[in-house]
Amino acid sequence: MNLFRSAHVLGLLSALAVGVAAVGPVWGPIAMAADAAAVWPAKPIRAVLPVPPGGVIDNTMRVVAEHLSSRLGQQLVIENHPGANGAIGAQLVANAQPDGYTLLAAVDGTMMVSLNPKLFPNATVSTLRDLVPVTKLGDFGLVLVAHPSLKVRTLAQFIALGRQSGATYGFGTSGIGSTTHLAGEMLAQRTGIHLIHVPYKGGGQAMADVLGGQIPLVMTTVPTAQQFVKSGRLYGLAVASLARSAGLPEVGTYAENGVPDFNTPGWVGIFMPIATPKPIVDRMQQEFAAVLALPAVRAQYAEIGMEASGLASAPFTQEIRVGSERWAEVVARGKIDLQ
């Protein structure tokens, strides 16, 4: 009888061991992720910016970098990897180890357009397949600016000139498939004026050429154009938002210039490799949100035409999906080649 009981107990123990082994692969990665998050960060964090130095992404990140480093106890190392409208930097991050030590700071054009499989079917990186949205740093408006030689000071005046003359006007942007590119295409679709896209490898180069008079127009971000409009070196024709921008309050909206419902806000967001443990993603979002809530940071953002956000991952992901669909419609309607 005792032998029977012993055998029965041993059988139960064996079955339990088999069960534990069976579920091991399920809870093992969860435990490993929790362990990784518990000690993270244990070394400096690499922040990849897929643009040249300067411009809205660079300025936005440098405002928060020191504060974030202080909160995390590790340095945030900023690296610029420009090219292919942000795709080079995004590819670098998508291929990085998903250990919480590499992140991407990018604008909406890069994430919603250039890496959208509906718009770029041959792209090697797809935003929501290969990267996880962590948080939105802030929102900014787009503005159409003109060289003074164009002799128009508002969008309404430019539309009238374009319709009267029937001429074609070049507009510079930060690159093919950027939000600024598609906003210009949408303007042409909505007004019937003839615009030809002049892509650059970055917004800074486009601004240099419009300042020098090589091109008459640039579609750019409010933070990028702000200082030149305020100094009178360029004319701000209209901001592509529902309300006037705090960064350029003197410039009217598209609706004020006879083009209603023209709202193409931009944003700068943070992304990490798709397999990054959720506890690390959540911690990163919380730390960014805390930094973005600081009065000093919000004031600095306001000075460069940014509105601080800190949006959580889930609503940020949904915003990306909605924006991608909107621009896909613009591309389809205009039969625009983004390759």
Image (cartoon, grey):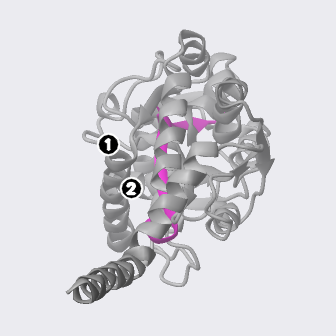
Q: Residue at x 70, y 66 (%)?
A: 92
User: What range of the chain is rendered magenta?
Assistant: 128-149
Which x, y percent locates residue 291?
A: 56, 23
Label placed on residue 186? 2
Q: Is residue 312 left or right of residue 174?
A: left
Q: Residue at x 61, y 62 (%)?
A: 98
Asked if 154 appears above or below 269 in the picture, the reply is above
Viewer-closest of 288 and 259: 288
Viewer-closest of 198 and 26: 26
Which x, y percent locates residue 132?
A: 48, 58
Whether 132 is among the magenta residues is: yes
Which x, y percent locates residue 336?
A: 46, 73
Residue beneath disc 1: 262
- How much space separates mark 2 and mark 1, taking CA atoms? 9 Å
**Which of the marked residues, 2 or 1, is nearer the chain's N terminus?**
2
Q: Is residue 95 left or right of residue 107?
A: right
> Marks 1 and 2: in contact by CB < 8 Å?
yes
Image quadrant holding the N terminus, namely bottom left
